Image: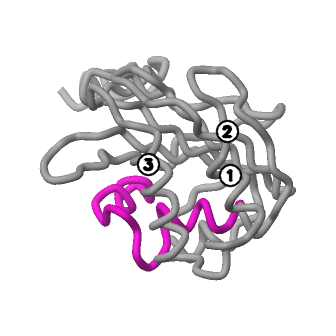
């Protein structure tokens, strides 16, 4: 019996890792960004008044178990938002990012970098849309909507501020923050 159990465990460990499914959306275990493989650090569902808005996933080069470590880490990161809600107007997304800056990086609120970042979002997000925010270790912030490049901004300060929106002391959603940190 013990031998059978050992064989079963060995078989399970040898099986390929499948994409994880959350709320009907398959989350990749790894993604490649700028020739770097990033691993799924964690994910959570952003809720607003009991409405599931999107699945937020954090991919990183290194395992990031705490917000402090994530904000200090100089490796590349990707924040992926898989939208679940039928429609989120661009004004609401811009307001949410602005509020996130105000709560977690107040020095960025009126900065040129933040204004340029907010100007990248010119369309509504609908159920099934995927928005990627790439935070390069070199400070390059890139945004994509359903694979279409929205723009790039070179700013280490902005990269840290965007990450702080999700993982800072006053995140928009504590459960999402904990999920992105794999808790």
State the separation of the CA atoms marked 2 and 1. Answer: 9 Å
Please state which of residues 122 and 32 is positioned toward the viewer in this rendering. Answer: 122
Please state which of residues 175 and 115 is positioned toward the viewer in this rendering. Answer: 115
Q: In front of the other: label 2 or label 1?
A: 1
Q: Which of marks 1 and 2 precedes in the sequence? A: 1
Residue 42 is marked as: 3
As helix, strand or loop, the secondary structure at mark 2 comes to strand
Q: Position of residue 23 (x, y in %)?
A: 24, 28
Stretch of the chain drawn in magenta: 159-183
Q: Which of marks 2 and 3 precedes in the sequence? A: 3
Residue 153 is marked as: none
Residue 143 is marked as: 2
Residue wearing tag 1: 117
Q: Position of residue 89 (x, y in %)?
A: 39, 37
Q: Position of residue 161 (x, y in %)?
A: 63, 67
Q: In front of the other: label 3 or label 2?
A: 2
């Amino acid at each position: 019996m013990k031998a059978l159990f050992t064989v079963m465990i060995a078989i399970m460990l040898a099986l390929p890792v499948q994409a994880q499914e959350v709320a009907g959306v398959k989350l990749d275990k790894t993604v490649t960004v700028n020739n770097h493989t990033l691993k799924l650090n964690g994910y959570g569902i952003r809720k607003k008044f009991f409405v599931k808005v999107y699945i937020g996933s954090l991919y990183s080069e290194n395992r990031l178990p705490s917000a402090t470590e994530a904000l200090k880490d100089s490796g590349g990161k990707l924040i992926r938002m898989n939208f679940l809600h039928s429609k989120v107007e661009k004004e609401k997304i811009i307001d949410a990012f602005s509020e996130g800056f105000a709560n977690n990086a107040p020095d960025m609120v009126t900065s040129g970098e933040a204004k340029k970042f907010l100007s990248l979002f010119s369309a509504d997000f609908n159920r099934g849309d995927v928005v990627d925010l790439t935070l390069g270790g070199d400070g390059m912030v890139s945004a994509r909507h359903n694979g279409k490049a929205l723009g790039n901004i070179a700013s280490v300060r902005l990269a840290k501020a965007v990450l702080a929106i999700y993982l800072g002391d006053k995140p928009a959603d504590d459960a999402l923050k904990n999920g992105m940190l794999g808790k």
